C-alpha cells in the first residue's frame, strides 16, 4: 500500500488546486482557501477537541492534583504514587497473564481452524457462519451469559454439563487461580471467529502456483502446509499477534463485568486499576494517578508499535 | 484471537503486510457498488459526471482488478482456487479419510462452540427462574415460561435500549463518515499548505492508545470548550469523539491518493468546483473504502462499553451494553436471560441474512488492518 | 443546480459543528426551570429494574406531591448508591438534584465542598430540632450547618434468614440462631439439605466486603479504627475481633463448605441471591426487606429477621443510614423545593399522623411494604407512636422479625468508622475474598498488609 501510493502521489505533485499565494481575502477565497478550510474544519474541530486537546490535558494532569475545582502542580508525585501502589504490580502481572493466556488459547486455535476450513470442499459457508456466530453476539451480552454459565455451584450450567462426565464442580470465577483462565476462555469464544475469518481471507491470497511447485518437488500435505502456507501467512500472523498484545494490554470489559477484579484482586488489570483510580472512590477520583498510569501504559505500548513498524517495514521491502 | 476489546478502537498503526492483498487501494478494490454504501443513493443522483468517472476508472483498472475480484469472490463463496491439499491428495485414502474425519470433527466442535451457547440461551429464555437455578439442564421439567419474553420486552424494555444501541451506532457512523471523507478529500485532493501539519497531527494520534484519553476526554465531555454545557447524558458525548479516528482518515486518504487524477482534471475543465468534485466524483468512486470504514464504525460502536458507561448515565438513552449489567441484580433470572436472548437474536438474524457482507467485511477488515 | 449541490455539500461538512451546537443547547437536561416557570426537581426513585408495582406506588406519591406543590415539577430518576460509581456521577453532574448518600461519606463531601448547605431550608421544618443528635450529626458540617438531611433507612445490622430453607433443613424458623456457633451449625445443616445453596453468605464486593467485615468485627467486640481527641486516626484491622470473624468465615467455607459457591457478592447481588432462595442466612441492614420486595420480588412468607449474634464484652451492632443531599451548585430555589420533597417523601410521614396514614395507604394499594423495622430517627416514643398510626396498614410479616424487633431498642449501637471509611472498606474487600477463595489464605498477613495501607491512607490526611 505504501509502496504504491508514494510514487502515485509524486506523480500528481503540484495540482492546480493548490492555494494561490494569499494577497487579499478575496483572492484567498477565489483560490480555494475558503473551501479548503471548510473541508478541513471537521477534522480539525473533532480531533482538536476530542483528541489533541485531551492528549495535552493528559500530560498536564499527570503532574497535577485536581478535584475539578482546585488544581495544583505536584511534579512527579502521581507517578511515585502509582509506582508505590502494591496493586500496580498485581495489575501488571494479571494483565501479562491475561495476554499470555489469550495468546495460548486464542492464537493457535483460529489458525488451525482456518487452515482446516480452507480445505473444506462442501458447505464452507456453513463452517464460516458457525465460527463467526459468537462474534455477532454483543460483547456485554456474551459476558453476562458466560457469567451465568460459570455459576460455580453444582447447579451451574457448565458444572452440570461437566458433571455428566464426572468432572467438577469447578469454581470458575470464584477462585483466584481459575478466574483469569475463565475470563480468557470467554473472551476467546467471543473473538476467535473474527480471527478465523481474517486468516481465511489471508489464505485465499496464497498463490496456487506455490502449491503446484511444491507438488512438483513431491511435497505431501503436511509439508505443503508447513513450508508454503505458514510462510505466506507470516505477515498476517505477526500483525494479529501485535494487535492482540496491544488489545489485551487494555482489557477492561471482562474483568469489570465478570469479577470486578476479584477474587482477591486476582483479575484486576491495568485498565481496571486506571478506572478505579479515576472513578471508583466514592469521595472523588484520583485523576492524576489515573492519567499517570495511562501514560506509562501508553509508553509501553508505543514501544510495541515501534517494534511493529520496524518489522513490517523490513518485511515489505524485503 | 481474543478480540482486543478496547472500548474505543485500539490505536491501529498502518502497515503493509507482504502477503495480504492491498484492499485499501483501488488496485485491489472490488467494483464500486459491491459494498453497500449509504452514499449510494445520493451518489446516483450525481449525474453523468459520476458515471463518466466510474467508467474511466473501471476501464483503466479492468485488467488486474477484475482478476483479483473474481478470485476473491470465489474464495468468499467457498470455492477457493485451491489450497494446500491438491486434487491428487484428495484421492489418497489417508488424506481423504483423515481430512474428511477432521472436517466432521471440526464441524461438530463449531456447532458446539458456536451454536451451543446460543441454543442454551434460547432455552433459558423460556425457562422458569426456579428451574434455571435448580436444574438448569433439565428440559422444561415445569413447563415453559413464555411470559419471560413478554416481561423482558415490556418491563425491561429491551426494545428501547436496542433502539438506543442502533441510534448510537448510526450517529457514530455518520460522524466518522463526515470527518473521514472531508479530511481525506482535503488532505489528498485539495492539499492546502497547512495540510501536512494537520496530517502529521492526525497520524500521531495513532500511537496514543485509547486509554490515555479516558480521563481527560471524560473531563472534556464534562466541560467542553466553547459549548458551556456538559455533554454528559447526550448522544453527542459518544458520537463526536468517535469521529476522531486517525485510522479512518488514513484509510480514506490513501484511497483518495490512488484515484486517477485525470478524472479530476477533466471535471475541473468542465467547471466543477471543489464541492462538486467531492460530492459527484470522489465520493461515488470511493464506495469500497466507505464500505470498509462503515463496517469498522458500526462494529466499534457495537462493542463499545466503557465510554457509554461513563457518559450515558441517564437510563433513557443508554444502549443495551450499559443497561443490561445495571439491572442484572434486580431482574428475575428468567426474565434477564430472556432479555439477553432478545438482545442476541436481532444481530444474529441480521448476520444470517447479510452473512456474506458480514464475512467479507470481517475478512476485509483483517486485511486492511494488516 | 450547481448551487443546490454546493449547498448540500456545505451542509454536509457544516452539519457536524452546527448540529452539535444546536443539539447541545437543547440537550442540556439540567434546566432549572421548565417553560411554564415550575421548578424542576430530579429526585431518587427506585433501584434500576424495580418491580412495576413499586414504580406505580412511587409515581402515585410523586403525583400527590405535585398536586400539593403545583410549582414544582418532580422528575424521578432511578438510583443506586454504589461506592464504585458515585464519584463519577458526582463529578459528571449526573446525580439527581436530591440524592442519597450513606452516613459515612457526608463529612468528607462537606469538607470538599461537594454538597450544598441546606441549613436555612432545613430549619424551616417543624421537627428540625427533634432529631436524635447522633443521627443529625452525620450530615452536619464543622460549621454546625446541616448539609445532608437524615432521610431514611437508619438501620442496625440484623441477621436475615430464609424460613423455607430453615424448614427444609429441619430447623425451627421461629427460633433463629442467637450465637455465631449456632449460625455455623445451622448454616451447615441448610447447606447439607440443599445442595447448591449457601447456608450462610457474605458480601465481598464494591466495598460491602469491608462494611460487613466491620459488622462482624463489632459483633465480636473488636473495633477497626480509633480516632484520638486530636483527630489523629489509628487503624486496627489486625484486632482480635476481625481475626475471629475471618476465622469464622474460613471455617464455614473450607471446613463445613456451607457458604455456597458464589463469593463475589455485593449488596444488590446478595439481595438477588437471597430472594431467589439461594442463601440461608446473611447479615445486612435491618431495612433491606423493603428493597428486596421492591426490586427482587421477595416472597414475604420465606423471610425472617433476627438480631445479630453478639459475642464478647464490647460487642456492638453496626449502625448506619442514608442522608439526602444536593450538589454544591444547587440554587436556593431548588433547595427550597428539595426540602419540601424531603419533608414529603422521607420525613413528614414519620412525625405527622395524616401523612403517615396517607403514605401507608398509597404503598399498600400497590402491595408495597409498610412497617419494615428501622431505627428511630427522632426518639423511641415517637417511633412507637408512628407505628401505632399505621398499625392497620402494616403488611410486612412483623411476626417473622420478632428476633430483631424485640431487642431493637436495646442494641448496643456502634457507628461506622469515621475516617476514610469507604476507601478502607475497599482495602478490606480483597481480604474477605481471599479468605473465601483461597484455602491457604494467611489471615494475619492479609490483615497486617491491609492495616498498613489503611494507616497510610489515614496518615495522608
Image (tube, coloured by chain):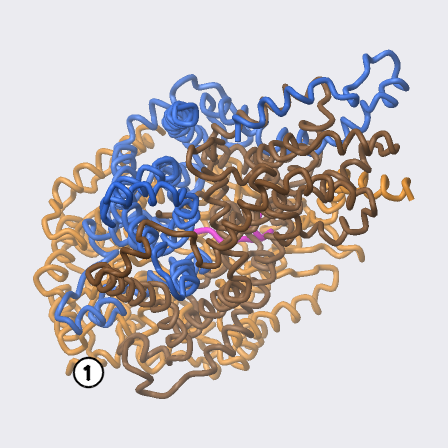
Q: Is residue C261 left or right of residue C374?
A: left
- Element on which disc 1 rests: helix
Q: Nearer the viewer, residue A208 or B171?
A: A208
Q: Residue at x 27, y 45 (%)?
A: A224
Residue that lies at the very extreme toward the front in this rendered image: A216
Residue shown at 51% from the left, 22% from the top: A60
The residue at 50%/76% (across/down) is: B151
Location of residue A132 by image quarter: bottom left
Tell me where residue A120 sits by quadrant. Answer: bottom left
Q: Is residue C124 visible?
A: no
Q: Position of residue C260 (x, y in %)?
A: 20, 66
Callout 1: chain: C
Colour of the chain lettered C: orange
Res. A306 image quadrant? top left
Residue C141 lies in the magenta stretch: no
* Chain B shade: brown
Q: Colour of chain A?
A: blue
Query: Circle 1 is placed at which residue position?
Result: C168
Percent position (x, y) of residue B181? 68, 38
Q: Residue furthest left?
A: C255
Q: Quick one: A206 or B278, which is closer to the camera?
A: A206
Quarter of the image where the C terminus of chain C is located = top left
Q: Which residues are magenta?
A: C94-102
Q: How many numbered marks are there? A: 1
Q: Tell which of C238 and C379 is nearer to you.
A: C238
Residue C189 vs C341, above or below: the answer is below
Amino acid at each position: 500500500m505504501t509502496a504504491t501510493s508514494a510514487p502515485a502521489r509524486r506523480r500528481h505533485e503540484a495540482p492546480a488546486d493548490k492555494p494561490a499565494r494569499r494577497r487579499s481575502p478575496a483572492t484567498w477565497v477565489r483560490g480555494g482557501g475558503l473551501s479548503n478550510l471548510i473541508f478541513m474544519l471537521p477534522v480539525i474541530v473533532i480531533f482538536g477537541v476530542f483528541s489533541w486537546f485531551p492528549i495535552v490535558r493528559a500530560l498536564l494532569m499527570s503532574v497535577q492534583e485536581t478535584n475539578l475545582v482546585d488544581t495544583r502542580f505536584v511534579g512527579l508525585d502521581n507517578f511515585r504514587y502509582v509506582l508505590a501502589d502494591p496493586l500496580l504490580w498485581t495489575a501488571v502481572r494479571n494483565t501479562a497473564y491475561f495476554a499470555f493466556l489469550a495468546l495460548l488459547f486464542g492464537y493457535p486455535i483460529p489458525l488451525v481452524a482456518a487452515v482446516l476450513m480452507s480445505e473444506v470442499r462442501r458447505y464452507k459457508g456453513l463452517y464460516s457462519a458457525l465460527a463467526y456466530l459468537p462474534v455477532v453476539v454483543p460483547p456485554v451480552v456474551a459476558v453476562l451469559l458466560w457469567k451465568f454459565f460459570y455459576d460455580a455451584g453444582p447447579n451451574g450450567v457448565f458444572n452440570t454439563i461437566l458433571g455428566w462426565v464426572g468432572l467438577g464442580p469447578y469454581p470458575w470465577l470464584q477462585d483466584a487461580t481459575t478466574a483469569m483462565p475463565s475470563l480468557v476462555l470467554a473472551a476467546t469464544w467471543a473473538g476467535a471467529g473474527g480471527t478465523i475469518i481474517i486468516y481465511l481471507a489471508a489464505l485465499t491470497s496464497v498463490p496456487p502456483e506455490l502449491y503446484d511447485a511444491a507438488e512438483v518437488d513431491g511435497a505431501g500435505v503436511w509439508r505443503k502446509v508447513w513450508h508454503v502456507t505458514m510462510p505466506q501467512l507470516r505477515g498476517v500472523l505477526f500483525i494479529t499477534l501485535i494487535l492482540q498484545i496491544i488489545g489485551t494490554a487494555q482489557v477492561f470489559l471482562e474483568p469489570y463485568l465478570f469479577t470486578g477484579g476479584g477474587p482477591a484482586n486476582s483479575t484486576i488489570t491495568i485498565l481496571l486499576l486506571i478506572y478505579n483510580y479515576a472513578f471508583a472512590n466514592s469521595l472523588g477520583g484520583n485523576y492524576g494517578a489515573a492519567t499517570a498510569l495511562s501514560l506509562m501504559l501508553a509508553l509501553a505500548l508505543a514501544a510495541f508499535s515501534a517494534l511493529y513498524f520496524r518489522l513490517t517495514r523490513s518485511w515489505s521491502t524485503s | 484471537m481474543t478480540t482486543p476489546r478496547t472500548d474505543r478502537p485500539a490505536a491501529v498503526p498502518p502497515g503493509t503486510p507482504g502477503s495480504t492483498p492491498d484492499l485499501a487501494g483501488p488496485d485491489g478494490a472490488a467494483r464500486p457498488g459491491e459494498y453497500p454504501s449509504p452514499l449510494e443513493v445520493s451518489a446516483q443522483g450525481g449525474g453523468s459526471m459520476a458515471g463518466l468517472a466510474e467508467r474511466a476508472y473501471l476501464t483503466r483498472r479492468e485488467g488486474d482488478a477484475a482478476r483479483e475480484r473474481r478470485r476473491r469472490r470465489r474464495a468468499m463463496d467457498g470455492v477457493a482456487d485451491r489450497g494446500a491439499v491438491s486434487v491428487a491428495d484428495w484421492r489418497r485414502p489417508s488424506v481423504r479419510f483423515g481430512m474428511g474425519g477432521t472436517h466432521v470433527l471440526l464441524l461438530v466442535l463449531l456447532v458446539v462452540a458456536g451454536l451451543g451457547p446460543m441454543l442454551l440461551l434460547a432455552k433459558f429464555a423460556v425457562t422458569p427462574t426456579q428451574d434455571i437455578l435448580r436444574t438448569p439442564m433439565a428440559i422444561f421439567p415445569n413447563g415453559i415460561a413464555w411470559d419471560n419474553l413478554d416481561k423482558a420486552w415490556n418491563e425491561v424494555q429491551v426494545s428501547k435500549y436496542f433502539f438506543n444501541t442502533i441510534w448510537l451506532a448510526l450517529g457514530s457512523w455518520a460522524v466518522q463518515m463526515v470527518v473521514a471523507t472531508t479530511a481525506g478529500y482535503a488532505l489528498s485532493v485539495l492539499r492546502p499548505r497547512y495540510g501536512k501539519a494537520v496530517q502529521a497531527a492526525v497520524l500521531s494520534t495513532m500511537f496514543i492508545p485509547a486509554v490515555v484519553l479516558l480521563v481527560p476526554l471524560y473531563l472534556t465531555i464534562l466541560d467542553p470548550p466553547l459549548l458551556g454545557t456538559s455533554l454528559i447524558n447526550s448522544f453527542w458525548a459518544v458520537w463526536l469523539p468517535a469521529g476522531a479516528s486517525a485510522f479512518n482518515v488514513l484509510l480514506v486518504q490513501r484511497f483518495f491518493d490512488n484515484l486517477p487524477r485525470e478524472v479530476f482534471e477533466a471535471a475541473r475543465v468542465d467547471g466543477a468546483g471543489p464541492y462538486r468534485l467531492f460530492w459527484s466524483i470522489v465520493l461515488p468512486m470511493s464506495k469500497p473504502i466507505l464500505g470498509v470504514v462503515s463496517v469498522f464504525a458500526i462494529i466499534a460502536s457495537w462493542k463499545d462499553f466503557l465510554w457509554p458507561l461513563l457518559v450515558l448515565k441517564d437510563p433513557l438513552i443508554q444502549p443495551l451494553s450499559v443497561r443490561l449489567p445495571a439491572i442484572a441484580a434486580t431482574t428475575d433470572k428468567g426474565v434477564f436471560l430472556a432479555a439477553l436472548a432478545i438482545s442476541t437474536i436481532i444481530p444474529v438474524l441480521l448476520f444470517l441474512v447479510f452473512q456474506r457482507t458480514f464475512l467479507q467485511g470481517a475478512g476485509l477488515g483483517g486485511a486492511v488492518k494488516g | 443546480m450547481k448551487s443546490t449541490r454546493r449547498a448540500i455539500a456545505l451542509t454536509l461538512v457544516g452539519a457536524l459543528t452546527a448540529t452539535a451546537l444546536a443539539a447541545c443547547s437543547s440537550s442540556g437536561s439540567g434546566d432549572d426551570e421548565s417553560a411554564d416557570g415550575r421548578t424542576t426537581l430530579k429526585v431518587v426513585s427506585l433501584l434500576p429494574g424495580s418491580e412495576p408495582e413499586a414504580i406505580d406506588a412511587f409515581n402515585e406519591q410523586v403525583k400527590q406531591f405535585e398536586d400539593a406543590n403545583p410549582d414544582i415539577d418532580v422528575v424521578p430518576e432511578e438510583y443506586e448508591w454504589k461506592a464504585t460509581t458515585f464519584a463519577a456521577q458526582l463529578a459528571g453532574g449526573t446525580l439527581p438534584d436530591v440524592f442519597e448518600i450513606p452516613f459515612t461519606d457526608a463529612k468528607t463531601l462537606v469538607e470538599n465542598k461537594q454538597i450544598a448547605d441546606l441549613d436555612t431550608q432545613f430549619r424551616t421544618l417543624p421537627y428540625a430540632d427533634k432529631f436524635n443528635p447522633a443521627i443529625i450529626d452525620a450530615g452536619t458540617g464543622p460549621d454546625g450547618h446541616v448539609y445532608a438531611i437524615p432521610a431514611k433507612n437508619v438501620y442496625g445490622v440484623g441477621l436475615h434468614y430464609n424460613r423455607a430453607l430453615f424448614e427444609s433443613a429441619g430447623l425451627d424458623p421461629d427460633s433463629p440462631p442467637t450465637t455465631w456457633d449456632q449460625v455455623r451449625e445451622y448454616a451447615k445443616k441448610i447447606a447439607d439439605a440443599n445442595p447448591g445453596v449457601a447456608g450462610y453468605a457474605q458480601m465481598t464486593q464494591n466495598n460491602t466486603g469491608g462494611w460487613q467485615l466491620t459488622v462482624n468485627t463489632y459483633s465480636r467486640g473488636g473495633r477497626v479504627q480509633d480516632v484520638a481527641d486530636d483527630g489523629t486516626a489509628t487503624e486496627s484491622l489486625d484486632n482480635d475481633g476481625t481475626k475471629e470473624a475471618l476465622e469464622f468465615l474460613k471455617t464455614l467455607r473450607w471446613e463445613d463448605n456451607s457458604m455456597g459457591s458464589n463469593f463475589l457478592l455485593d449488596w444488590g447481588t446478595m439481595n438477588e441471591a437471597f430472594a431467589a432462595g439461594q442463601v440461608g442466612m446473611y447479615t445486612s441492614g435491618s431495612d433491606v426487606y423493603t428493597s428486596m420486595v421492591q426490586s427482587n420480588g421477595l416472597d414475604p412468607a420465606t423471610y425472617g429477621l433476627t438480631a445479630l449474634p453478639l459475642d464478647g464484652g464490647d460487642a456492638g451492632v453496626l449502625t448506619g443510614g442514608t442522608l439526602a443531599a444536593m450538589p454544591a451548585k444547587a440554587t436556593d430555589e431548588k433547595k427550597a423545593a428539595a426540602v419540601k420533597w424531603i419533608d414529603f417523601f422521607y420525613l413528614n410521614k414519620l412525625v405527622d399522623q395524616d401523612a403517615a396514614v396517607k403514605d401507608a395507604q398509597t404503598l399498600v394499594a400497590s402491595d408495597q411494604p409498610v412497617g419494615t423495622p428501622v431505627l428511630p430517627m427522632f426518639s423511641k416514643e415517637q417511633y412507637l407512636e408512628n407505628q401505632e398510626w399505621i398499625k392497620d396498614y402494616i403488611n410486612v410479616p412483623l411476626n417473622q422479625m420478632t428476633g430483631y424487633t424485640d431487642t431493637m431498642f436495646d442494641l448496643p449501637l456502634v457507628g461506622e468508622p469515621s475516617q476514610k471509611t469507604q476507601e478502607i472498606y475497599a482495602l478490606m474487600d480483597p481480604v474477605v475474598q481471599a479468605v473465601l477463595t483461597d484455602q491457604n489464605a494467611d489471615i494475619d498477613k492479609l490483615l497486617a498488609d491491609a492495616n498498613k495501607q489503611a494507616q497510610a491512607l489515614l496518615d495522608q490526611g
